Structures are given as structure tokens and as C-alpha cells.
Image (cartoon, rainbow, N blue to C red):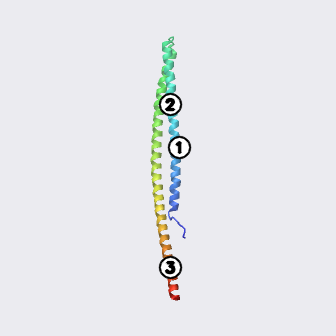
């Protein structure tokens, strides 16, 4: 039996490598997004603690400087949170681009795998026809030899 060789195997191998690379890029984008979201969560928690401290100072004794500092800290945290939300948005956009690229690369790979499967099926059919032809020729030859003996 002949050996099957897919003539576009090198292209399929490249598509597999591209898919692996796209998966790694997607994973890195996801990790970056998770990190940015965690930073945002930490800033929000810090802001809440500053608000709690401001409320506590307002209901306790009146320490004007501490109240101002607390309100300034809350204002600064609001600004940091806005900046961090922008970073989170950017990370989400990068993740979406990586997801789309991964999806495209996977579709290309699957297309080439389908082409390979189809080529393999054609190869098997051709081999089956070749074997049938050889069997027919052998049967004809054997029958011709027996007919010549009689």
C-alpha cells in the first residue's frame, strides 16, 4: 500500500503554530485584564475605606484637617478609579481583538484539516480502486492460465 502524503502539510503545520501563538496571546490578554480588574477592585475598596473614615470623623469630634485630608483622599481615589477603568476598558478591547484573531486562526486550521481529511479519503478511494484493478488483473490472468491448460 502506498503512503499518504498531504501536499499542504507544511501549511497545516504553520496554521497549528499560529493557533498556538494566538491561544497564548489570548491567555496573556486575559491575564492582563484580570490584573487590571483586580487593581480596580483594590482602588474601589480603598476608596470605600476612606469614605468610612470620613464618615467616622464627621460623627466623631470635629477634626477639620483630618476631614479635609479624608475628603481629598476620596477625591484622589475617584480620579485613580477613573484612570483604572480606562485601563480595564483598554484591556477588554485587547482581549476581544485576541479572541477574534484566535477564532479566525482556528477556522483556518479547521479548514485545512478538512482539506487534509478529504485528500486522505480520496487517497483511500484511489488505493481501493488500484487494489480492485490488481485483483481483477490477477483473476483474469489466473483464469486465462487455467483456460489454457484445458
- Secondary element at image label 1: helix
- The residue drawn where x is 45% and y is 51% is 104
Relative to 50, say whether 89 is above or below.
below
Number of numbered labels in the structure image: 3
Q: Nearer the viewer, residue 59 or 150?
A: 150
- The residue drawn where x is 48% and y is 74% is 132
Relative to 20, say whether 62 is above or below.
above
- The residue drawn where x is 52% and y is 26% is 46
Give percent across and percent down for residue 8.
50, 63
View extreme (front): residue = 150
Which residue position is annotated with label 3? 139
Instruction: Give the numbered dot on residue 28.
Output: 1
Q: Nearer the viewer, mark 2 or mark 3?
A: 3
Callout 2 crowding tier (Cα within 10 Å): few <14, some 14–19, many ≥20: some
Q: Using the numbered discs, state the Cα–Cα distance from disc 2 to disc 3 in whole angstroms.
A: 81 Å
Relative to 149, say whether 117 is above or below.
above
Which residue position is annotated with label 2? 41
Sequence-wise, the earlier of marks 1 and 2 is: 1
Q: Using the numbered discs, state the Cα–Cα distance from disc 1 to disc 2 in whole angstroms.
A: 20 Å
Amino acid at each position: 500500500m502506498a503512503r499518504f502524503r498531504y501536499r499542504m502539510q507544511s501549511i497545516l503545520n504553520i496554521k497549528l503554530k499560529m493557533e498556538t501563538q494566538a491561544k497564548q496571546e489570548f491567555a496573556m490578554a486575559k491575564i492582563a485584564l484580570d490584573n487590571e480588574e483586580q487593581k480596580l477592585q483594590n482602588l474601589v475598596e480603598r476608596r470605600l475605606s476612606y469614605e468610612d473614615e470620613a464618615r467616622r470623623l464627621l460623627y466623631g469630634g470635629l477634626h477639620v484637617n483630618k476631614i479635609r485630608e479624608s475628603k481629598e483622599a476620596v477625591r484622589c481615589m475617584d480620579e485613580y478609579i477613573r484612570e483604572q477603568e480606562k485601563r480595564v476598558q483598554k484591556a477588554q478591547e485587547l482581549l476581544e481583538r485576541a479572541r477574534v484573531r484566535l477564532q479566525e486562526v482556528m477556522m483556518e486550521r479547521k479548514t485545512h484539516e478538512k482539506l487534509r481529511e478529504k485528500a486522505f479519503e480520496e487517497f483511500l478511494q484511489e488505493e481501493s480502486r488500484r487494489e480492485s484493478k490488481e485483483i481483477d488483473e490477477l483473476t483474469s490472468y489466473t483464469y486465462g492460465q487455467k483456460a489454457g491448460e484445458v
